[in-house]
Image (tube, rainbow, N blue to C red):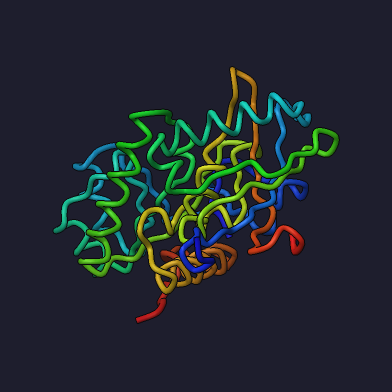
Amino acid sequence: MKPTERFKRRYISFSLSLSGNPPSYNEAKEMVHAHFLSFFGEGGISSLAFKLVKYDAQSGRGILRCERSRADEAIFCMACLSEWKGAPARLEPLSTSGTIKRL
Amino acid sequence: MDIVRFEPTGKEGAGRALPVSSLSNFFDAANALAAKQLCRKKFALVHPSGYEIDDGDLLELARAGGAVVFSLSDVVSERGFRRAIIISKMRLLLSACRKRGTGFVFATLAKDASQMRSARELSAFAAVLGATDVERKDAEKRMAGIATASTKPKSGKPNSPVQVGK
């Protein structure tokens, strides 16, 4: 596929906390995937080009990928996370970039 | 700039958050009838809980120099289908505001510090509701104007009008 035909990507760095502490990698992956799936649905996720690129369980920081024109929707979705399995949770977007290196 | 429902301390960004208690022109409209009466008040900031205001009332609100408040916490507090419904209602109301020339602002109306959100998240919220870049900037300017007006000493008159954009 030609580069012009691919999804135009945006990378969003985020900070994740569950009850004030950074969750483990598996828990974070489950949380982020379940929340995005609940918000966008299966069709929405496919057109969003969503992917959890990186997550550091020590700092609670990570990077996710989305389609360029839908970065605002992805950030709004992140803002909508307030609890996970009864515990207070926060998925805070930090910065947005077209490359992982610049984040 | 943001409007919140609690008294923020320095730690929670007091410079950025404006408590509802400091705004004499902020009103919660429990239903469409209440909103109808509130839309006649000069420079009123109306937060309709159901996001249903008639077009005629929006026209009156525009004439009175008021604005509609869209709250992010209304979306965050709901889940699933009910969240989808409230976003849909907000989109329709924003479209009606644009049609009638009524001003609007975006705020979190957070009840505590954990419900507060960043300016980027508020901007994304506005974009999801269908606000253009220009409208988002206008809403931010209007919010800054509200903050300036609310810090002025009260003289028994309503807060000074906030003229933005047009």
Residue A74 place in picture, x, y as percent: 52, 48
Residue shown at 30% from the left, 36% from the top: B85
The tally of labels here is 0
Q: Is residue A89 above or below residue A69?
A: above
Residue shown at 59% from the left, 27% from the top: A83
Check the image and name the residue furthest to the bottom.
B166
Residue shown at 52% from the left, 39% from the top: A80
The C terminus of chain A lies in quadrant: bottom right
> Viewer-proximal residue, A30 or B87?
A30
Residue B57 place in picture, x, y as percent: 19, 56
B21 sits to left or right of A96: left
Figure quadrant of residue B39: bottom left
A37 sits to left or right of A13: left
A72 sits to left or right of B89: right
Residue B63 place in picture, x, y as percent: 24, 70
Check the image and name the residue furthest to the left.
B56
Figure quadrant of residue B1: bottom right
Q: In this view, does B64 lie above or below B94?
A: below
A31 sits to left or right of B24: right
Check the image and name the residue furthest to the front.
A1
Figure quadrant of residue B34: top left
> Viewer-proximal residue, B116 or A8?
A8
Residue shown at 37% from the left, 48% from the top: B47
